[in-house]
Image (cartoon, rainbow, N blue to C red):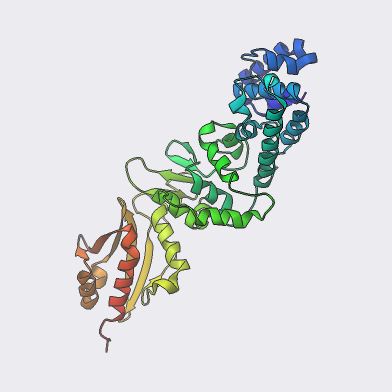
Amino acid sequence: MRVVRNLAANSDIERPEEYGRSLAGLHKLLPYSGDILEHFSNAEVGQIGFSPQQVREEAVKAGLILADAGWRERIDRAEEHGYFSGQIEFLLDFCGVLAEAEHTPSTWDASLHTKLQAAFDEYLAKAQVCFVSSGLADVKSQLWKRSLLSIGDYLASSGSNSSFLTDPPRNWDSWKRFLGGTRGTRRYLKLLWDRIDTNAAIEPQLEQIIASAAGLEPWREAIIRYPEMISYCGQQEIRRSWNTDEIYLLRKRQMSGYHAELFTYALYWDIAYGAASYNLVPLGLEPYQDVYMTEVEPFVLFVFDRSQRQVNLCIQSSNGQFRIHTSSAGLAELPEVEAALCDLGFGKGDDILMRLVPRGEIHQLLQQVAYSLANLPTVS
C-alpha cells in the first residue's frame, strides 16, 4: 500500500486514459504484492502506467530498505511529510544515494550505509525547516526565494513567463514539481541547504546569504535586493522578453494586466528606502507607476513644483539603460528649468526633453538634477 500510494500520489492521473493505464499497471503488480520490495529492487519494472520517475524512485528505496535496516524508518518518516507525500527522490539525490546507485545497495558495506543515512538525516531536517505541509515555509521578506535566487536561476519557465514557484502541488510551477523535477535546477536548493544550520535561527542565515551574494546577473541582483520585487507578482510570475533587455513583474499572468518593469521598480525602492541618503530635494518621489497596457512603459515618477507649475520627470527602462524625460510643453513657461536640464545633457526630442543614462549612473544624475533645480534663481 505504501508503494501504491506513492505511485498514485505522484503521477498525473487526470484523464480517463491515464486512469486506465494506472489500473492496468496495478494489475501487473498484483502477482508480486507479497514481495513488492524484492520485485522493485531486482527487476526492471518497466512501463506500468505511473510516473516513470516515481517508479525509479520506488526501485531505489526498495533496494535500500532490503539492504540495511536503518533505511526503513528514515524513508517512512520522510515520505509522511505532508507536502512530499512519498516523493523524496531529491533527498536521495542530495545525500548521495543516487550517485552510488550504479551499484546496488546490497553490495554496499555498512560504513557507506551509515554515512549516507547520516547525510539523509541532515537533509531531511533541512527539508522540514524549508517546507511545511502546505508548501514553502513562511518566513519574512521572501527570504527563501531571494536566497535561493542568489544561489542560481531556479525559476520555472512556461513560454515567455517564468515563476518564482507556488505551493499547490498540481500547479505547473509548484515547489512539488521543482523537487521532483530534473536535477539541473534543484541543485541550487542543495547548495542553499549546504549553507544553513538547522540548529541556529534560519532567517538571519538567509539574510546573510543574500547580503553576501556577488557576481550576479543584474536582474537577479535587482530582485534579491528587495522583497517587494517578488511580492508584487500576484501569481509569482515575471515576463522575460526574448528580444529586449526588459523584464516585467506581473500582477496576474499577462501583460494586459497591471505590470511593473523590473529595473525601474528596483530603482523606485532604492530611492524610497534611501531617500535621506540620496538627497533629492526638491524632487518629490511619487508612487511607482505600473501600467496595464503594452503601449506605455512603467516608470518612476518625480515631481518638481515651481512658480505654481508642476514638472514631471519620468524614468523608464530602455535597452539596458534608463531613459529620463519630461514634457517640453510643461517647460514652456519655465525656461530656466529647461536650461538647467540641457546643461546636464538632456536633449530635445519629439515634444520631450530627455537623456539616456547607464543604470549604474542614474543616482548620480538624479542628484545632479536635484542640485541644479534646488539652486535655480529664486522666483520673485
Q: Is residue 103 left or right of residue 252?
A: right
Can you give x and y, in whole percent of width and height, for residue 276 in the image?
A: 44, 74
Q: Nearer the viewer, residue 139 or 230?
A: 139
Check the image and name the residue furthest to the bottom.
380
Q: How many marks?
A: 0
User: In this picture, is 309 found above or below 90?
Assistant: below
User: In this picture, is 7 found above or below 313?
Assistant: above
Name the residue: 54% across, 37% down: 187
Name the residue: 66% across, 23% down: 60
Quadrant of res 208: bottom right
Can you give x and y, in whole percent of width and height, for residue 73 in the image?
A: 78, 32
User: In this picture, is 136 found above or below 345?
Assistant: above
Q: In which quadrant of the rendered image does the N terminus lie? A: top right
Quadrant of res 267: bottom left
Name the residue: 70% across, 31% down: 86
Can you give x and y, in whole percent of width and height, for residue 117 in the image?
A: 70, 33
Question: Is residue 134 visible in the rendered structure shown here?
Answer: no
Q: In which quadrant of the rendered image does the C terminus lie? A: bottom left
Q: Is residue 217 left or right of residue 357?
A: right
User: In this picture, is 284 found above or below 123?
Assistant: below
Q: Is residue 244 left or right of residue 23?
A: left
Can you give x and y, in whole percent of width and height, for residue 105 in the image?
A: 68, 22
Question: Is residue 277 visible in the rendered structure shown here?
Answer: yes
Q: Nearer the viewer, residue 128 or 219?
A: 128
Q: Nearer the viewer, residue 307 or 36?
A: 36
Check the image and name the residue furthest to the top.
31
